[in-house]
Amino acid sequence: MKVIEADNVYPWEGSIKVPQEGEFIKLREDRTLIVPDRPIIPYIEGDGIGCEITPAMILVINTAVEKAYNGSKRIVWVEALAGDKAEEKTGERLPQETLDILKEAVVSIKGPLGTPVGKGVKSINSILRRSFDFYSAVRPVYWMGQPAPIPDPERVDLVVFRENTDDVYAGVEFFPGTEEAKKVREFLLKEMGAKEEGFPEDVGITVKPMSEFKTKRHVRKALRYALENGKKNVAVIGKGNIMKATEGAFINWAFEVAQEPEFRDRVVTDPEAEPGEGQVKLTKVITDQMLMQLVLRPEAYDVIIAENLNGDYVSDLAAALIGGPGFVPSGNIGDGYALFESTHGTAWDIAGKWIANPLSLTLSGAMMLEYIGWKEAAEKVYQAVREALADRIGTPDIANGFKKMGLQAKELGTIEFAKEIAARIQ
Ligand code: NAI
């Protein structure tokens, strides 16, 4: 860790240092968190711009925690390696000690990780997702004053819950012209009633499995979030009209969850009824309709529950409405375990210039603070980011956005911008 001088940051030095001053977050049997006042939080810098935006994030989060709790709480940051840096230092892209500390610490944060192009190279992101069963990708999308492509981006304030283990992430594919595709095609034609016209000899076939268990645990997480955070309008989306066995089932399972004892009295499913105090309303919306609604009436939705592929489309469109993925945080969340991360990639084209926008990772840090129950500190981050953007300062992508709108703006490097945000934390 260059740049940031902080005595609560323990960089990797030949191995992971677990400092005496910190304690690990623990999980109760019901998978809720026990958070000590000095939680050890591992951070993975990530590739490309990762080593630039990570210290920026730590600077802002440390300042917010200090101001919110006057030293009675503080994060103990411990570096874990993954990606290029891990390969260079240890010969492995995802060392076992990284997996071990992420498990022990329960909650952690990472910058972007690149996947080298080539056969047989596994994506670290997907290994992490599978290792910790992060079954919900949670993306809050809200506007903080940055340049955006629509005139009234304040209408967007929603959270996308994207299922993270099922559907195309679990699917199998058979490429056209292969023996496998031929075999599957013959099986479908001879034994499963498929028709020749839909399956000519040159087909490629993708199988997308979706399961009741995986869907329901994801839906429960989203409904609990909506109820705990006073979000009223929850939509479950899918192309259930076309893919009845998978996306149709996803929607039906969501409504079954709404009938479970935990939710029955608190989730309104009658399309004509309005949710009362302490209740949410669950509606179903066809995916293409939702994409259109997001552009026309984004204020109508507070939480969107999606399976994997639809969740991908919807979260990117929602992010675009408020200015792009550079402003959107994200969390990969399972049963208690959580890994927060920036939504953009490694941005190799600007790496090394110290001009990367640190907001996606910084807001992911704030989301992490909320997740561990340190809401006062998270709120301070949001407030300071809003103020900095209102003052029209930011990295070149932000400043240029303002300039394109005919507004003056001050261009800053990654760390200078983070310092300006930190200076606005009261
Ligand atoms: P990218 O997000 O890295 O870059 C796309 C464009 O956005 C580039 O012009 C870049 O300069 C710009 N950009 C991205 N982040 C920025 C920031 N913070 N500030 C200013 N400009 C920013 O997407 P790309 O090129 O498709 O992916 C590059 C690598 O990143 C790939 O190896 C990909 O697999 C990986 N990736 C990793 C993710 C993760 O770890 N969660 C997510 C997305 C991509």
Image: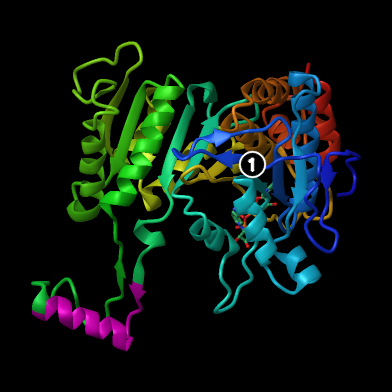
Horizontally, is 98 left or right of 149 in the view? right
> Which quadrant of the figure has residue 69?
top right
**Looking at this view, is 139 or 39 the one in front?**
39
- Residue name at image x 28 percent, y 54 percent: 211
Q: From the viewer's perspective, is residue 122 above or below residue 246?
A: below
Horizontally, is 109 left or right of 130 in the view? right
Residue 279 pos. (x, y %): 32, 18
Give yes or no for residue 177 being in the magenta stretch: yes
Q: Quadrant of ligand 1?
A: bottom right
The stretch of residues the image draws in magenta is 173-190
- Residue name at image x 51 percent, y 56 percent: 129
Residue 80 pos. (x, y %): 73, 55
- Residue name at image x 83 percent, y 27 percent: 420
Quadrant in which the C terminus is drawn: top right
Q: Residue furthest top?
A: 277
Q: Secondary structure at mark 1?
A: helix
Q: From the viewer's perspective, is residue 363 above or below residue 169?
A: above
Residue located beneath label 1 in the image: 326
Q: From the viewer's perspective, is residue 359 above or below residue 117?
A: above
Q: How is the image coloured?
A: rainbow
Give yes or no for residue 184 being in the magenta stretch: yes
- Residue name at image x 65 percent, y 26 percent: 378
